Image: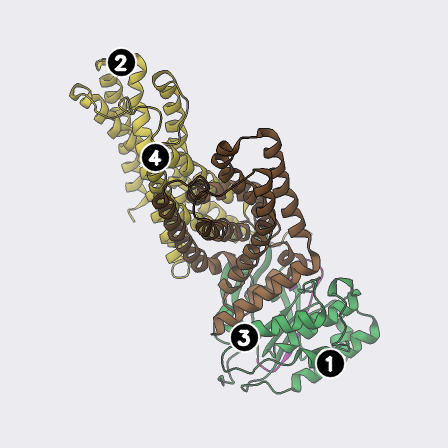
Amino acid sequence: MSYLTHLLTHLRKDLRLEWRARDSINGMLFFSLLVVVLFSLAFEPDAAVSRQISGGILWVAILFATVTALNQAWTRELRNDVLDAQRLAPSPASTLFLGKAIANLLFVGLVELILAPIFVVFYNLHVLGNPWLLALVMPLGTWALIVNGTFFAALGLRTRNRELLLPLVLFPISMPALLGMVQATTLILTGGDNLYAVFWIKMLTGYDIIFTTVCILLFETILHAE
Amino acid sequence: MPRPQTFRTLLWLWFALSLIALAIGLRLALIAPIDAAQGNIGSMIYYHVPMQVGGLTFPFVNLIGSLAYLYYRSRNLQRAIAFDALAVAAAEVTVLNLSVGILSGMLWAKPVWGIWWTWDERLTTCLLLWLLYVSYLLVRRFSSTGQVYTLSAVISVFAAIDVPIVYMSTRWYRTQHPSPVFFSGNPGAGLDKSLYPAFFSNLAAWLLWGFFLIALRYVLERRRQQAQHAAVQHAIATPEAQ
Amino acid sequence: MTHPAHTEAAQLTGVSKLFGSFAALRNITLTIPPGTCTMVLGENGAGKSTLLRLIAGLNAPTQGKLTVFGDAPQSQRRRIAYMSHAPMLYDELSAMENLRYFAALYKSDGCACVGSPEMALRAVNLDPHLTRPVGQYSQGMRQRTSLARVMQADPELLLLDEPFSNLDVASAQQMVELLTDFRTWPVSGGGTRTILLTTHQARLAEPLADTVLTLRQGALISSLPKTGAA
């Protein structure tokens, strides 16, 4: 129970920090909207084509939102040497990581909720498949991006080139998940084979479980690396 | 651990052996019959495939080195650092092999398939493995001395977990969306028996050469570590001028 | 949770710390007995902060052996509290929110060993009900909040890096008195309080310290018990 309490403490802290500053969510919203609008302007697709490509475009927009969140994920800990205080705290290090990752998930989730109706409007979308499956794919896919992103953002914290490092290492790591989320979303939107969609969802779930476990196990190692 | 002199002799022998093997491989490759459909470019397989095989094998050496480092770092620091030297040596040779492999593959693919690139499971895996190990090397370059070993070891672990997943997911993707390019002209697929001597001798030769490079780089890294250790002792003994 | 009283608070044997090629600490051997207050003096760059960071467990020695309460500092986190130059507080949160957050991190099942944030803030002369975020505090207020943060953790070993900087003379005097007092507060779970602090203002901390260590260019120059004469 103590683990959960610590986790909630960290989560509450991150939510409170973002609520006070609100700089992260604004940035995320701006970039994602930009992507959605830009592609809609550029392509003007008809309904069928729109459904084919919208899966990819949606996830590009969410990717922008996620990377914006990740780039500043640990900045508040870097200021004032708070990270040192965190390293010295007796609470399990992985709770710090999970709290932050879950907070990021909630922020990006909020952006997704705002994006969704705008998306439907601009792409004249009409989901042919099972929309409840979509409600499953979104958090699974977003978590896949965020869990690894938050981890590697922390890993690069004290390296000199972290802006380069984060995308460089995240792309290969996230690629299977990206494939899964785009495939699943496109299949659901175009009313494609449900079996395949569910297959990709299962793959995403497996991916999430594996990498969440690895990140939790290794976070303490990288936090104290020195 | 063999004594340094023994190791050095072994290394020289290995070097000579690799050169001989490479020479044999080259000769066999030059006299091997040319594939009618592909023409001269078909000979690329004697170079491309061994490079790729090396690029897919040496990461295991890196993984072993990284895991051993993580295991020993709280128990026997000297041994842990030696394993880290092995890890970085393997990582560099991996990047070398993969770079050459991917480039040579592209050079082969353009005339034979008509395209530079496709996202099939093998190419995707190789590219992503390359990206992961380039970031491994970048992390080593850009982190401060204390953390280098641990951070790069963690990336190694992630790479080891990720690469099979990448391979499988791309493969599944490909069963749903078969690549538009037909695969019968795949390098190394359905190799005619007459090409076996050239192929396998080159495979063996380039792998020998790759392992030699790893061993050489390992020795260099160990020397660098020892020099650093000596510098540390010196810095401790003499106060720096303010 | 009682501990053998005779374990040294900190023990260093031949400890050196290098950052790249710069030797911040060179061959340090010293013992910090429990229940004492030790003051570390030295110029900038002498290695005072590094020494504290090593004892806190934030950095590992490049060479040598270091133990805190007979164990690695990382295993003794609950008994150590460290205050650095930087406030180690979230700018966006108020003092009370910061302290409550950090107090929660030090709690564990069945252990009521954390002091009250409110009490800690009052002890450093700050209003616990101030809702302004710490980022808007003056330097002195931030310093005092930082001290409150480490005191509330109820540590047996208190590490303070330049605690009197940024404080005016009156506040600094108050802090010295507070720390003198703090030494006498009972530790939940038994044990004594040990303080190790670095400072440039030797005269200020003199009444507090039992021993004075001096570092120069990373080496320990002297270790003197406090004498009566100036």
Of residues A110 and B53, which is closer to you in this image? A110
Q: CA distance from mark 2 to mark 3?
A: 73 Å
Have a look at marks 1 and 2 and say if they share a chain. Answer: no
The circle on residue B174 is 4
The residue stretch that appears in magenta: C34-49
**Between tags 1 and 2, which lies in front?**
2
Question: Chain B: what color?
Answer: yellow
SS label for mark 2: loop
Residue lying furthest left: B193
Q: Which chain is brown?
A: A
| Callout 3 amino acid | Arg
SS label for mark 4: helix
**Between tags 2 and 4, which lies in front?**
4
Q: Residue at x 61, y 71 (%)?
A: C102
How many other residues sit within 10 Å of disc 2, few (<14), some (14-19) or many (≥20)? few
**CB atoms of marks 4 and 1 within 8 Å:** no
The residue under label 3 is C78
**Between tags 4 and 1, which lies in front?**
4
Q: Mark 1 or mark 3, which is nearer the start of the sequence?
A: 3
The circle on residue C6 is none
Label 2 resides on the chain identified as B
